[in-house]
Every structure is written in C-alpha cells, then in structure tokens.
Image (tube, rainbow, N blue to C red):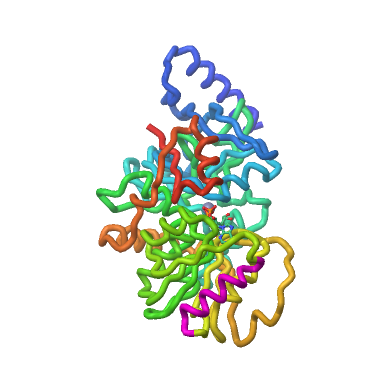
C-alpha cells in the first residue's frame, strides 16, 4: 500500500519535474515532505551491458544520508557487476557532498565532503564485535548473504528507475548523480585540498591495496614484498608496503606500461612476466634470485587470474605469507608442495577495512605526501564516456579511471 502510494507520488513528482521545462539533468524539487531529484545513473543490465538513464532519488529516511556524487572511481569489479544477472546502478567507489540527512544521523551534516564505503556494518553482530566490520553478518553486501542486498542498503523505494525500485551495486551505486546510503557508508573527508576524484578511489582500490598490507599482512618494516599484477589494486599494495617500510618491493606484470607505473608507486624491482608462464613459476625464480635464493617475506596476488591463485605461494620463503587480494573464487588445482614449509595463505576482503579508522589514516598519509592519490588518476570521464572508461581499464591504460559529475 505504502509502496504503491510512493510510486504514485513519484509519478506525480516526475510529471511536475517534466512540466517545469528545466533542461538540466539534476532538477531538484522540494515539495515537503518529499524531495525528489532526477539524475543520470549507469545501469547494468545483468547480461554484460549497461545504459545511462534517468533515475529518481528521494529524500533520506531517518537512518539515511543523501550524497551528491562528485566522482566515482572505476574498479575491475564494476565490469564484473555488468554480468551479475540483475539490473543495478553500477559503482562502488565514490566521493561527494552530503545534501541532506535523516533525523537519526549524527556523524555527518549537509555540506560535509564524504568518502563512500561499500562495506556497511551494524556494529552489533558477532563479526562487528570481533572487530571485523568488513565482515558484518547483518549489513555487508558481500558477507551477509542476501545476494548483495542487505539491511546495509538504503530503502529500496528511495531510488527508482521508470517508477520501479532499483538496486545499487554494493548497496551504494556510485556511478549516479546522487546516492542514498546508510550512515556506515559515509566517512567525512577532512582534507582541504584533496580532489574529489582522488577521494573517490580511496573507497575500494586504495583501501583494498593499502589495507591488505597494513591490516591483513601486517607487513614488518625492512621486509621484502612481491606484488603480482600492478593494476589499480596492486599499485596500492605497493603504496601500503612502502608506508609500512618494506625494504624491497618487487612488481610483476605482463604489461610493461604497468611496470613503469609500478616504479612510480613504490616498486624497487620489476619482473616482466609472460602469459605462458603458468603459475608464474619462472617469475618466481627471478624473485628467488632477487631475495638471496630464499623467496620473499610476503607476496600479494592482485591479478584475479584464477590460475594464479597459488602463484604467491611460489614467491614466498619458508614461513612466508601469501596474500590473495583479488578475491579469486574459481576452483583450481594446487601443487601442495608450494605450501612447503610453514607458509601462511590469507584472502582478506577489502583490506579488512575499518572505514572510520582507515580512511582518515589514508587521508593523513596523503596529506603528509606518503601516499599518492592525484597521481594515480590517469584520466577522468563523464558518465556518457563510461564505455571508453571500461575499455581503457580493460586494456590496462589507466592506473585509475574516474567518472566525474558536475
Ligand atoms: N577482494 C577484494 O576486496 C577486492 C577489492 C577490490 C578489487 N578486487 C579485485 O582485484 C582484482 C584487481 O583489480 P584491479 O582494479 O587492480 O584490476 P586491473 O585490471 O587494474 O589489474 C590487474 C593487473 O593484473 C595484470 N595481469 C594480468 N594477467 C597477469 C599475469 N598472468 N601475470 C601478471 N600480471 C597479470 C594486468 O596486466 C593488470 O595490471 C579485480 O579482479 C578486482 O575485482 C578485489
Ligand atoms: Zn555487524
Ligand atoms: Zn572494487
């Protein structure tokens, strides 16, 4: 009943907006008690494609925040999300400005600059109490089930496409002019100087890379680290390793342009691999030569190539740590001798993100000049250039590509 009433109200709002003759995409009406905004959003069709369409975003409910997106970073996962079998608003990296807040919101105010976080948490469940906010059993779009839709998602009826509620990728759908989110999805950005594109990439790529080193591996100063795949995530593993004081950072990739980028972001050594190096065993020999025949202390896999799931094990010394950052989910065969001896293999999600601790730390590293963000953005695009942005990402042309909004 309430749902139908809302749909009717939205239809009225759309009709009013259309009749105003305004030409801008973002036409905001304030007809108490409901404010509705029409804006552009990138919509995945679930079968590998997407389109840019107008959506209607309503005012926040009591536990929601309305954010005007200024920039949305593109992560490889966004391309995967086109094929998730359902229609949704794409994007899970983003930064913007708070437009309005519900009455129960206390951590941000309208006008605040915010960084979006895709791992919502409830603060009360078993994992939250264990300190694993990124694994929240209630609200996380990855760990709480619900096929991605959880109580971490703002009310479904708050965002509509052609009058029907539409899901948002990772509960936030940042490739849209505006997004409605729960409070745990926003962190205030205190930097005066950081651009919105730079802030937007903290949301996933930077956090995942940096956190995999600092929170998950807890890399020891002076140690050696190998990074397999120096894309958006891998480059940030290197930045995290540099901040943690790694003595040697070896970058491995099949794309020479990527290795050039790697040097800028902290690699002390590079190894150009080839696609036919199955399991990167030849590259592992190079790593051994560089590490006195022993193997590295840590190896981070950031390629998302299933066959490379065991490759970080081949790179590390006895009792070394292999970190599978990319989230490989396919079934693979592993030569158990790669585990010999005493090796640890972990697969952290989202760099074990604690948004209210890690985002401000990352901002501080940026302010002190130890973490490059502006330099990581190779190109910005309008939402109408999303096709080109995906193509550049898939061809490995960008450290990071970012969609920007007025
Ligand atoms: N687990 C998580 O929390 C999490 C978070 C963010 C992203 N991811 C995943 O991490 C993966 C990497 O993301 P990204 O944005 O950095 O992607 P990307 O495409 O920018 O980077 C992948 C890199 O791997 C390199 N590569 C490909 N084949 C290789 C090979 N055989 N040997 C060595 N290098 C090779 C590519 O040249 C590229 O530089 C994606 O699959 C993404 O979905 C996981
Ligand atoms: Zn929880
Ligand atoms: Zn991501």
| Relative height, residue 173 to residue 352 (above, below) | above
- Between 109 and 21, the one lying in front of the other is 21
| Relative height, residue 251 to residue 405 (above, below) | below
Q: Residue 92: give x, y in percent of width and height.
A: 52, 48
Q: Is residue 352 visible?
A: no
Identity of the residue drawn at 32% across and 41% down: 111
Looking at the rendered image, the quarter that the C terminus falls into is: top left
Q: Does the magenta stretch include residue 287?
A: yes
Which region is colored magenta? 278-292
Identity of the residue drawn at 54% across and 29% down: 55
- Between 189 and 13, the one lying in front of the other is 189
Magenta stretch: dominant secondary structure:
helix
Q: Residue 358: give x, y in percent of width and height.
A: 40, 63
Identity of the residue drawn at 54% across and 41% down: 390
Q: Residue 310: give x, y in percent of width and height.
A: 64, 71
Looking at the rendered image, the quarter that the N terminus falls into is: top right
Left of 144 or right of it: where is 74?
left
Left of 7 or right of it: where is 360?
left
Q: Residue 5: give x, y in percent of width and height.
A: 61, 27
Identity of the residue drawn at 47% across and 81% down: 291
Q: Is residue 174 visible?
A: yes
Q: Which image quarter: residue 367?
A: bottom left
Q: Is residue 335 magenta?
A: no
- Between 284 and 104, the one lying in front of the other is 284
How many discs appear?
A: 0
Left of 313 or right of it: where is 219?
left
């Amino acid at each position: 009943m309430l749902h139908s009433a809302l749909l009717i109200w939205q239809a009225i709002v759309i009709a009013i907006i259309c009749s105003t003759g305004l030409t801008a995409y973002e036409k905001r009406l304030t007809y108490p008690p409901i404010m509705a905004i029409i804006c552009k959003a990138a919509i995945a069709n679930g079968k590998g494609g997407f389109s840019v369409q107008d959506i209607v975003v309503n005012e926040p409910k009591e536990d929601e925040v309305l954010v005007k997106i200024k920039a949305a970073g593109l992560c490889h996962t966004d391309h995967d999300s086109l094929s998730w079998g359902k229609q949704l608003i794409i994007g899970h990296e983003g930064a913007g400005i708070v437009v309005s807040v519900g009455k129960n919101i206390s951590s941000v105010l309208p006008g605040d600059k915010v960084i979006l976080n895709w791992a919502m948490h409830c603060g009360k469940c078993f994992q939250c109490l264990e300190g694993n906010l990124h694994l929240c059993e209630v609200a996380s779009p990855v760990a709480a089930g619900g096929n991605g839709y959880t109580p971490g998602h703002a009310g479904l009826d708050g965002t509509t496409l052609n009058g029907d509620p539409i899901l948002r990728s990772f509960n936030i759908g940042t490739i849209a002019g505006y997004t409605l989110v729960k409070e745990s999805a926003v962190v205030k950005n205190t930097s005066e100087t950081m651009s919105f594109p730079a802030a937007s990439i903290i949301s996933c790529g930077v956090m995942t890379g940096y956190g995999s080193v600092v929170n998950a591996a807890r890399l020891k100063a002076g140690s050696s680290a190998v990074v397999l795949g120096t894309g958006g995530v891998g480059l940030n593993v290197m930045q995290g390793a540099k901040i943690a004081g790694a003595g040697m950072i070896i970058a491995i990739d099949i794309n020479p342009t990527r290795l050039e980028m790697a040097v800028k972001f902290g690699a002390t050594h590079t190894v150009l691999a080839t696609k036919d190096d199955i399991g990167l065993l030849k590259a592992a020999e190079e790593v051994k030569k560089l590490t006195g025949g022993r193997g590295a202390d840590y190896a981070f896999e950031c390629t998302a190539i299933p066959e490379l799931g065991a490759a970080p094990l081949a790179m590390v010394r006895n009792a070394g740590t292999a970190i599978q950052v990319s989230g490989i989910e396919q079934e693979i065969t592993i030569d158990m001798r790669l585990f010999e001896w005493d090796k640890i293999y972990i697969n952290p999600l989202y760099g074990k993100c604690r948004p209210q601790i890690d985002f401000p730390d990352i901002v501080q590293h940026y302010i002190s000049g130890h973490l490059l963000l502006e330099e990581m953005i190779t190109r910005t695009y309008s939402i109408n250039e999303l096709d080109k942005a995906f193509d550049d990402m898939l061809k490995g042309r960008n450290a990071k590509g970012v969609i920007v909004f007025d």
